[in-house]
Image (cartoon, coloured by chain):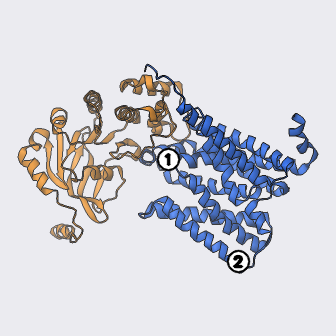
Amino acid sequence: MIDTVVSPFIEFSFMRRALVGCLALSLGAPPIGVFLMLRRMSLMGDAMSHAILPGAAIGYLLAGLSLFAMSLGGFAAGLAVALAAGLVARSTVLREDASLAAFYLVSLALGVLIVSVRGSNIDLLHVLFGTVLALDDAALILVAAIATVSLAVLAVIYRPLVLECFDPQFLRSASNLSSPTHLLFLVLVVLNLVAGFQALGTLMAVGIMLLPAIAARFWAEDVSGLIVIAVLIAFVSSLSGLLLSYYANVPTGPAIILLCGVFYLLSMLLGVRGGLIYRLLPRKHLEA
Amino acid sequence: MPNQGPAIIFSDLTLGYDRHPAVHHINGEVKRGELLAVVGPNGAGKSTLLKGIIGELSPLGGSLKLDGLKKSDIAYLPQQIDIDRSFPISVFDCVATGLWREIGAWCGLDADREAEVARALATVGLVDLAHRPVGALSGGQFQRVLFARLLLQDAALILLDEPFRAVDTKTVADLIALILRWHGEGRTVLAALHDMEQVRAHFPATLLMAREVVAWGETRKVLTPTNLAKARQLVEAFDEHAEVCERDESARERQPA
C-alpha cells in the first residue's frame, strides 16, 4: 500500500515536481477561497479565471510559451478587471457582481478575438488545461513564491479582512483599512489564479481555490479552522489526484479537481456543521 | 471631561442623496457630554444626520465640524446593519472587535483585554453565550452584543440609530441604563428614536427634525403637540422634479463680503 503511494514519486522526478507544485498551490489558494466564500464572492473566482485567460493568451502570442510573459499577462489582465470592477462598484450604483460580470465578459471576448485573429494554436491548450506534469524549475519557483507571498500578506491583513467580510460598516467607521484590505485581497486572488494556471490551467485553478474551502464549511466553526481544513483537503486531493492520474492514465488537473469534488460531496453528506445526514438524523432536542 | 464646548457644530448643513436633500439647512451645536434624542417622523432625516456625522455622507452644502474628535473617537450603531450573521465568528470575538482602537489590525488580546471583553459581556448579560457563534443569537441578544462592542469602543461620541428596534422591554430597559451610564461618564450620545415616551422619560435634550430643525432644546419644551404636528406637516414627499434650492445664494448675499 505504502509502496503504491510512494513509488511513483521515488521513480519519476516529474511526479516529484508535480507534487511539490501542487502542494505549494494547496497552501496558497484554499485560504483565499475561504474568504471568497465568506464574502459570498465564490463565483468571482470563476469570473476572474476567465478574465486572466486573455492576458495569458496575449502573453503567449507575444512571447511564445514563456512562463514569465504568460504570468505577467494573466496577472495584468486579472488585476485590471478586478480593479475596474471594484472601482465601478464603489463609485456608481452597480454592485460588485454586476460590474465584475461586465468587465470579465469584455475581457474574455477581447481575448478570444485576439487569439482567433492571430491564428489558432494547439499549444494554447497548455494554457487552458495546464501542464502539471511538466513543471520546470522556473514554474516551481513561481508557484512557491506566490504561495509564500500570499500567506504572508494574508497574515498581515487577516483581522481587517475578517471584519471586511463580517461587518464592513464597522471596519469603515473604525479605520481607513477597508479599501487597502479589499485591494490587497483582490491582488491575492489574481496572484493565486495565476499560480494555479501554471499547474492546473486557468479553468481549473479556481477549483483548487474554492472546492476545498466550500467543503471545509461543513467541518469548521471559525475562520482559522476553515483555513486549516481547506488546506488539508487540498493537500490530500493533490496527492491522490496525482496518483490517480499516474495509475489510471488520466489528465492530472481534472483528476485533482474531481477529487476535491469528491471531498465536497462527502462533506456535504457527512459534515458535522450542517451536513445533510447530520441534519436529517432524528435526535432529541436539548434542555437549553 | 472638563471641556464644555460644543462637540459637533452644524453650519447651514445640507445632506442628501442624489442632490435631493434629506437634511436641509441645519444650524446648531451639540454640547460635549450631552445626551440628545433625535426624533421626527419617518423620512425626517434622522439617520441621514447621523451618517453625516460619522462621515458616511458628505455634505451637499454647508458644513459640519467635529471639535477635536477623530474617526476613532466616534462609535456608531447603524439602523441598517450590514452584518453577515451567518459568518463563523464567536460572540466573544465579535465583541472584542470593539477594542479596535487599542489593538488595531495586529496587536493580540492580552489577559487584561480579555478580561475587559468578559466584563463587557457580563454588563449586557451574555456571559453564557460568549463562545456560541453569532448566528445562534436572537435579534435582541444580538443587539446586546452590539452594545457590548460599543462599551469596548470607549468612544467620546456615540451615535445610535434606532437602537431599540425589535427588542423586548427588559432589553430596552437594560440598554437605556447603559446609555445613561455613558451620559454619566461624560460621553456625548446622540440617539435617533421614535418612541416619544422613552425620550420624555430618559433624554434631557431633544432635537425634533423634519428635514429642517423644528425645535431643539429641553425635551419637555420640544415635544409639544404643536411642534409634533408641525413636524408631521413639514415632511414633504420626495419630489422628483424639485427646483434647485436657492437658499445658499440668498444666505451668502445677506452676509457682508
| Image quadrant in which you'd find residue A199 | bottom right
Residue B230 seen anywhere in this rendered image of the structure: yes
Q: Is residue B145 left or right of residue B15?
A: right
Q: Is residue B225 left or right of residue A280?
A: left
- The chain letter under disc 2 is A
A185 lies above or below A217? below
Q: Nearer the viewer, residue A117 or B144?
A: A117
* Residue named by callout 2: A116
Residue B171 x %, y %? 29, 29
Chain coloured blue in the rendered structure: A
Mark 1 crowdedness (10 Å alpha carbons): few <14, some 14-19, many ≥20: many
Please state, as top left, top right, bottom left or bottom right, where the C terminus of chain A lies in the image: top left
Q: CA distance from mark 1 to mark 2?
A: 41 Å
Name the amino acid, label 1.
Answer: Glu
Percent coordinates x, y for residue B107 in the rendering: 55, 36
The location of residue B231, given as percent across then percent down, is 13, 52
Do the CB atoms of the residues marked 1 and 2 lie less than 8 Å apart? Answer: no
Q: Which residue is mark 1?
A: A164
In the picture, which chain is orange?
Answer: B
